[in-house]
Image: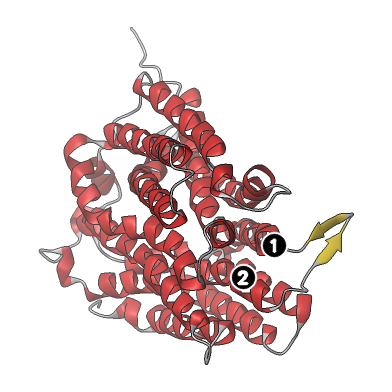
Amino acid sequence: MSTKQTPNYTFALIIVIAVCFLIGFVTTMNNSMIEFCKKAFDLSDAQGQLVNTAFYGAYAMSIPFGFMMSKIGYKKTLILGLAVVGLGFIINWAAISTNLQADTAVVYAYFLGSMFVVALGIVMLQLVANPYVMVLGAPEGGAFRMTLSQALNSVATTLAPIFIGAVIIGDQIPTPGAVPAPYLGLGIFTLLLCVILVFLKLPEIKEEEQAEAAGGVEKEYKSSVFKYPHVWCGALGIFFYMGLEIGIPSMLPAYFKANPDLGITLFGTTYNTATDFLTFYWGGMMVGRFIGAAVLSKFQPRVLLTFCLAGGAICVGTSFLLSGMASVLCMLAAGLFHSVMWPLVFNLGLQELGPHTKAASGIINLGVVGAATLTPLMGLVVDTPSLGVGVAICMMFIYYLYVAWFCWKGSKVGLK
């Protein structure tokens, strides 16, 4: 009599968690390039925010990529996503390194175009990475694996600004020529992951069986996901949340430009640029996620989300009452509260959907384009002499208000 052995997916899990790390690293690295691009390409604040538009605008493809995933499967989507990310970095290297003598506007256009390609791959990876983390191992260890992957994602978001400052910017004046070599290295690393995954055996994810195991078939559901208003309210919730998460690091270069004497020395290291301080913001996000993982099970999601919204708004509001580095540090502290808002908003938008959960995830994920539209709008406000960076940061209070409304009202619309 033979017994069926459970497959060992340890190596596959390591590779997929490396993909989660890559997602966080590339996403934060892109936002950290705003200050560099403004100096290297001589851009206005609104033009610098096009870095966010090019990257986060790719999330408009969330729903089409979701349909594609249902056709070709999870593994092929994962491989294709890595290939596209690697290709985008290679295009960046080839286009910029061969056009360094061209007009800076042309080189900047190449940079934005290649990062849009990278972002298309990141969107695909976002769709499949977390489901794979859940199934690559024993079911009872799924929560631990998910926590581990999210922790490494947060570590990546903290390291990305350090990478930009040390490898791309360094001690030199920012120039387009500093970009190609590091981006070529990232492209080669990503394509190497892609090749490894081609030869790895990954389990098939059967969502129908998971739904039945969860008992979802016993409940009656509406005929279409489009008949659930709270899903669309959730997409708008993510839209405005992205204005909060990306708003502070995106506006920091403009704040430093308006206050050129800012700087601080800690443990022998001098921090005097916006990029230097981004590590503190994303580090706060990392700490907040670890704390959130510990307390999430002890509080109702709506209560915890309300607390985080209030905490973030107080940090931003208090920064207006302070000056100098105290004001900057107070804004950066908001990252501690922003850290757990994404899963809370996302999960409230996915309530009571059963078989429509997958389609709803694509719709809510579409809200990420908020980072592609809100930050350029804030950049236009900064460039308007009668308004400035202070008014742009005040726009965040509108975002806080909507997410608070969604927390207590919008997430209940259409539900019994």
Residue at 20 percent of width and 71 percent of height: 228
Quadrant of the rendered image containing residue 370: bottom left
Q: Which mark is residue 300?
A: none
Residue projecting furthest to the top: 1
- Along the horizontal axis of the image, is 87 left or right of 189? left
Pointer 2 and pointer 1: residues touching (CB < 8 Å)? yes
Q: How is the image coloured?
A: secondary structure
Instruction: Work out which quarter of the rendered image holds the N terminus and state it.
Output: top left
Q: Position of residue 383 (x, y in %)?
A: 50, 80
Residue at 23 percent of width and 42 percent of height: 69
Closer to the camera in the image, 311 or 260 = 260
Q: Is residue 322 above or below residue 262?
A: below
Q: Is residue 336 above or below residue 403?
A: above
Residue at 41 percent of width and 45 percent of height: 130
State the residue position of label 1.
277
Closer to the camera in the image, 412 or 364 = 364
Q: Position of residue 354 (x, y in %)?
A: 24, 58
State the residue position of label 2.
252
Q: Amino acid at mark 2?
A: Leu
Number of on-image labels? 2
Instruction: Work out which quarter of the rendered image holds the C terminus and state it.
Output: bottom left
| Residue 396 shows in this picture | no
Q: Amino acid at mark 1?
A: Phe
Could you say whether the residue bearing mark 1 is in a helix, strand or loop? helix
Residue projecting furthest to the bottom: 386
Earlier residue among tags 2 and 1: 2
- Along the horizontal axis of the image, is 302 left or right of 285? left
Residue projecting furthest to the right: 268
Q: Is residue 292 above or below residue 191?
A: below
Q: State the separation of the CA atoms marked 2 and 1.
A: 9 Å
Quadrant of the rendered image containing residue 56: bottom left
Quadrant of the rendered image containing residue 204: top left
